[in-house]
Image: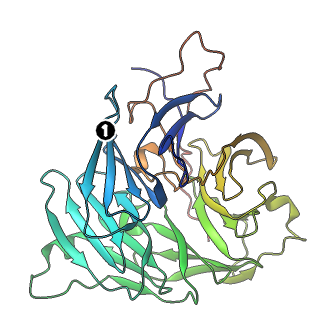
């Protein structure tokens, strides 16, 4: 079996020649491009390590590419309306799509639409499954985050409307992003909002664990695999690092950039749209409306690579937890069938992806 290789999958919402592009993380080599349409924000997903899915911006279909096919034939999954966000379950059995204010749940093996959930009052902005596929979460422009039990949704009587397990209503402006950590039904969830806060929740109890106030709206959020650090992308281009292990005991805290200058990544000139951390926790990947994707060394906060594309709007897919996760996404070679750079190319093949940290301590 080939050694693991970390790659980033990006989409350009204004590209005319391609829809998605695959980069080898550390060398910057361009491995593949997938053509056809323009994928929207929060609109990429990897299905079972076999298909790449992209919700087309303003269109009522989802594009699907089989990773192993040489001709990259694009297939279309028709939907009842434009898809605002998209995700798949880590076990590869289900697909979720946000269409207006409703959540559509499909069974992958049959293609059957299983249920339509209409508990949000405005458009859905983000969706994500827990790592064990037992729950999923939805965030919307109505400022709500809903936690759903997949089993309860599937077993609900057709005459009754499924109800979410938790309704988190502490945010006061639209939800922009959410990130689910390890632990399945015991996982912690970070939610970001235009109200300038990021909140950390516990799925099992529904309890709010931590609320961090910033001086700008937060557009993206992620955590490292050990959940020691939380990374928050601001509307003006900064990325803030919140250390969960050393954070004091209070549930509400303001992030002070002048006091925490060593916890700020500076380089983007416009809002940060997506974030993800490498499997070994040493590298942060960010996309921005300034038409760049940046690779950061987390310890030094230095930018170690910048990829610039005209009209680029980085949005990277969420995948199974075994491959790593985040809306800026890394994938391992075993889980996805992307080729390596040619041996005679000028690009150096990057280092192997490390295993996730074994420290499972639960700070905060």
Report the side of 342 relative to 236 (left or right): left
Residue at the image position 39 percent from the left and 49 percent from the top: 320
Report the side of 124 relative to 214 (left or right): left
Q: Position of residue 109 (x, y in %)?
A: 15, 50
Report the side of 95 relative to 20 (left or right): left
The residue tagged 1 is 50
Residue at the image position 32 percent from the left and 46 percent from the top: 64
Quadrant of the rendered image containing residue 145: bottom left
Q: Counting other residues with Cα less than 10 Å from the Cα at mark 1, is it few (<14), some (14-19), or many (20 or more)?
A: some
Regarding mark 1 in the picture, which secondary structure is present there?
Answer: loop
Residue at the image position 73 percent from the left and 46 percent from the top: 296
Quadrant of the rendered image containing residue 171: bottom right
Identify the residue at the far top of this view: 344
Q: Is residue 350 above or below residue 321?
A: above
Q: Is residue 19 above or below residue 240?
A: above
Q: Nearer the viewer, residue 56 or 197?
A: 56
Q: Quadrant of the N terminus?
A: top left
Q: Is residue 334 above or below residue 116?
A: above
């Amino acid at each position: 079996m080939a050694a693991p290789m970390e790659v980033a999958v990006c989409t350009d919402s204004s590209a005319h020649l391609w829809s998605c592009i695959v980069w080898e993380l550390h060398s910057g080599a361009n491995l593949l491009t997938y053509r056809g349409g323009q994928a929207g924000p929060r609109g990429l997903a990897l299905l079972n390590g076999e298909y790449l899915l992209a919700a087309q911006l303003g269109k009522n279909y989802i594009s699907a590419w089989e990773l192993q096919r040489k001709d990259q034939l694009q297939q279309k999954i028709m939907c009842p309306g434009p898809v605002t966000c998209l995700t798949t379950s880590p076990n590869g059995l289900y697909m979720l799509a946000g269409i207006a204010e409703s959540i559509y749940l499909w069974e992958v093996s049959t293609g059957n639409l299983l249920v339509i959930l209409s508990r949000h009052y405005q458009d859905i902005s983000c969706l994500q499954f827990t790592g064990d596929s037992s729950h999923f979460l939805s965030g919307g422009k109505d400022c709500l985050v809903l936690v759903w039990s997949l089993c309860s949704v599937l077993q609900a009587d057709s005459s009754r409307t499924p109800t979410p397990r938790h309704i988190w209503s502490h945010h006061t402006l639209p939800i922009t992003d959410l990130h689910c950590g390890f632990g399945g039904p015991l996982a912690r969830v970070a939610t970001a909002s235009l109200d300038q806060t990021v909140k950390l929740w516990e799925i099992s109890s529904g309890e709010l664990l931590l609320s961090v106030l910033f001086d700008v709206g937060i557009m993206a959020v992620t955590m490292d695999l050990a959940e020691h650090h939380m990374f928050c992308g601001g509307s003006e281009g900064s990325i803030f690092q919140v250390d969960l292990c050393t954070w004091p005991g209070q549930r509400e805290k303001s992030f002070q950039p002048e006091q925490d200058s060593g916890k700020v990544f500076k380089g983007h000139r416009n809002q940060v749209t997506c974030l993800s951390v490498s499997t070994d926790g040493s590298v942060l990947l960010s996309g921005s409306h300034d038409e760049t994707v940046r690779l950061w060394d987390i310890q030094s906060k230095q930018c170690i690579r910048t990829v610039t594309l005209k009209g680029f709007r980085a949005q990277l897919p969420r995948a199974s937890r075994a491959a790593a996760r985040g809306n800026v996404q890394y994938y391992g070679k075993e889980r996805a069938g992307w080729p390596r750079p040619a041996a005679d190319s000028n690009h150096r093949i990057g280092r192997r992806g490390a295993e996730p940290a074994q420290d499972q301590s639960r700070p905060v």
